[in-house]
Image (cartoon, rainbow, N blue to C red):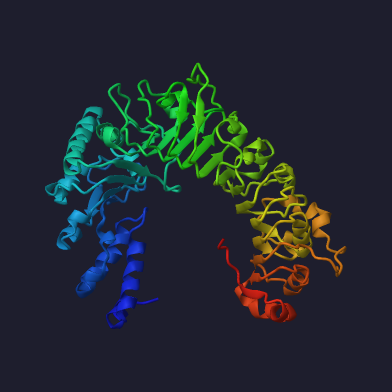
């Protein structure tokens, strides 16, 4: 790592790389002023190197709220508890205001104190510069949705209107408004409650003002409820909470001809396609490349559904993301032809896989299963049998990936056409790997990060306990039947990467590799490369097997 005091004497190319890394660390989608000040500090200490700072470093105007009150109550409503800071003066001094594309308002505190953003814009002298280049307005953190909660309702509306007028005057060309709340920095499906406050009124007013020109919209909450609203015909990205939309009395029809990304959340059973602009009872999402569907347990409230059958097609789809399939009533074959989706991503926990409708797998040859983290205090316990229906289904998959959890190796898998597999495993012992490979006659690449190759580590305290019954599977855990065989385990495998959190069992791996006649590349733990080369030296010398550091690259 290079320290700031050393950069003056560094080679020019090294200086550029260091500055680029500094910019990346100081300015990403979740950066705050604390991050950005590292760049400011660098510019102050090394003014002669400012010419090397790329223009992207000036694309974001950050306005951040800090709480001064030391009250232990996180909902403190002290009148003078907010302090607003910004990088505005830095951008002015650098002569880079015209480079600003994004205004980012950061509010991490849940204080209910008056918002005071209108005063801050004046105090920081931000309201003196009208920026026509700004296209994106982001509210980062949950604080906007508690600000001014204890304020008088009339005062809240008046303050929100004043602030709305300031923002829309300063930044008339905004085409994208977002709010991002941790831990998921992006569109969220959760409907926020108890939102009657200045911050929410302001957000609704801003969305209502800019909506006819917005190309990216979050219809989650808050969202204005007005009969005069219309979406832009150039709308390209939409995130929509189905349950929340049902609560709106007035909701404009959604144009689809320019949409490229569509996120539909809290869907109960089937999608209400009547929300979109129909063309003779048909919907053709011509340009949608990414579709996300999150299904939810019905809450019992009445649903608005079309009284006729709608023909829906996604001819340009590249990525389909699905969550909560057990609550879905959709017939996916009517939307997607066989093998028409380049990548299918399932966000599920193993217990939900038993209740899934697996014909969904027919729409793609590429499956990625991501563990759905419930963010619970204790690890959720599953059964190894929860995965059996998925592995037993005769899918035509060629590519599969399992991440987010240390899964048990499948005892039986009916994916005869599979060529590429990434599998995050709990115990990847020699017997389990051989059993897997023998059932995948076309497999060419196996990438397997694991907790351990040693079955004795099943009882280790450091192993995740998501699958407590893994030790009860004798056909996989009992290695007494393993013998030195003459025939090949796999005639197709050319690449095998394995990374163990515990020490790699080099001898076991060497015995396995000897029965992989087409193997050309073996990736292992970095500290085991030398031992692995020595253990399979004849294969390295005679067959050209390359032993290298584990890599997850495709």
Q: How far from the left and from the top, in percent, is residue 221?
A: 38, 33
Decide if residue 520 is in sight here: yes
The structure residue drawn at horizontal position 31% and vertical position 76%, both measured from the top left corner, is 15
Image quarter of residue 53: bottom left
Residue positioned most to the left = 128
- Number of numbered discs visible in the structure rendering: 0
Residue positioned most to the bottom = 9
Q: Is residue 185 above or below residue 206?
A: below
Along the viewing direction, whichever of 362 and 300 lies nearer the viewer: 362
Along the horizontal axis of the image, is 174 left or right of 492?
left
Q: Quick one: quadrant of the C terminus?
A: bottom right
Q: How far from the left and from the top, in percent, is residue 538?
A: 74, 80
Q: Is residue 140 above or below residue 255?
A: below
Q: Is residue 291 above or below residue 275?
A: below
Along the horizontal axis of the image, is 301 left or right of 238?
right
Q: Quick one: quadrant of the N terminus?
A: bottom left
Along the viewing direction, whichever of 494 and 448 lies nearer the viewer: 494
Q: How far from the left and from the top, in percent, is residue 113?
A: 28, 41
Decide if residue 462 is in sight here: no
Along the viewing direction, whichever of 137 and 396 lies nearer the viewer: 396
Q: How far from the left and from the top, in percent, is residue 448?
A: 65, 61
Along the viewing direction, whichever of 368 and 441 lies nearer the viewer: 441
């Amino acid at each position: 790592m290079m320290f700031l005091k050393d950069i003056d004497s560094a080679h020019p190319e090294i200086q550029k790389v260091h500055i680029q890394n500094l910019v990346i660390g100081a300015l990403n989608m979740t950066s705050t002023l604390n991050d950005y000040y590292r760049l400011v500090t660098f510019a102050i200490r090394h003014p002669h190197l400012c010419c090397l700072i790329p223009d992207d470093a000036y694309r974001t105007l950050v306005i951040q709220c800090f709480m001064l009150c030391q009250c232990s109550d996180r909902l403190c409503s002290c009148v003078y508890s907010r302090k607003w800071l910004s990088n505005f003066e830095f951008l002015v001094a650098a002569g880079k205001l015209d480079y600003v594309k994004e205004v980012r308002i950061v509010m991490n505190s849940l204080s209910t104190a008056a918002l005071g953003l209108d005063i801050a814009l004046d105090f920081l002298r931000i309201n003196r510069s009208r920026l026509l280049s700004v296209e994106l307005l982001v509210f980062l953190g949950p604080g906007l949705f508690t600000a001014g909660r204890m304020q008088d309702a009339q005062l809240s509306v008046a303050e929100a209107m004043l602030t709305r007028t300031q923002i829309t005057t300063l930044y008339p060309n905004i085409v994208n408004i977002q709010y991002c709340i941790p831990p998921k920095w992006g569109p969220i499906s959760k409907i926020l409650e108890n939102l009657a406050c200045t911050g929410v009124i302001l957000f609704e007013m801003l969305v209502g003002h800019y909506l006819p020109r917005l190309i990216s919209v979050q219809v989650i909450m808050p969202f204005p409820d007005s009969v005069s609203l219309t979406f832009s015909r150039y709308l390209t990205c939409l995130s929509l909470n189905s349950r929340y939309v049902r609560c709106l009395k007035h909701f404009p029809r959604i144009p689809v001809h320019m949409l490229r990304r569509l996120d539909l959340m809290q869907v109960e059973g089937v999608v209400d396609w009547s929300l979109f602009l129909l063309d003779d009872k048909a919907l053709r999402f011509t340009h949608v490349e990414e579709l996300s569907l999150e299904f939810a347990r019905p809450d019992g409230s009445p649903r608005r559904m079309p009284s006729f059958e709608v023909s829906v097609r996604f001819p340009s789809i590249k990525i389909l993301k699905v969550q909560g399939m057990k609550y879905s009533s959709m017939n996916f074959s009517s939307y997607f032809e066989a093998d028409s989706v380049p990548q299918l991503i399932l966000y599920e926990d193993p217990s939900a896989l038993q209740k899934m409708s697996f014909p969904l797998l027919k729409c793609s040859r590429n499956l990625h299963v991501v563990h759905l983290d419930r963010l619970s205090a204790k690890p959720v316990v599953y059964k190894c049998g929860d995965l059996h229906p998925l592995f037993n289904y005769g899918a035509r998959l060629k590519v599969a990936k399992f991440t987010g959890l240390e899964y048990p190796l499948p005892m039986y898998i009916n994916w005869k056409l599979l060529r590429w597999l990434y599998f995050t495993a709990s115990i990847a012992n020699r017997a389990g790997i051989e059993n897997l490979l023998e059932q995948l006659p076309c497999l060419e690449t196996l990438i397997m990060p694991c907790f351990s190759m040693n079955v004795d580590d099943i009882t280790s305290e450091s192993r995740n306990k998501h699958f407590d019954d893994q030790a009860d599977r004798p056909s996989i855990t009992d290695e007494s039947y393993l013998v030195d065989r003459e025939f090949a385990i796999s005639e197709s495998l050319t690449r095998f990467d394995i990374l163990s959190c515990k020490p790699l069992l080099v001898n076991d791996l060497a015995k396995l590799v000897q029965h992989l006649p087409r193997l050309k590349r073996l990736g292992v733990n970095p500290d085991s490369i030398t031992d692995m080369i020595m253990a399979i030296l004849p294969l390295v010398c005679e067959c050209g097997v390359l032993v290298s550091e584990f890599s997850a690259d495709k």
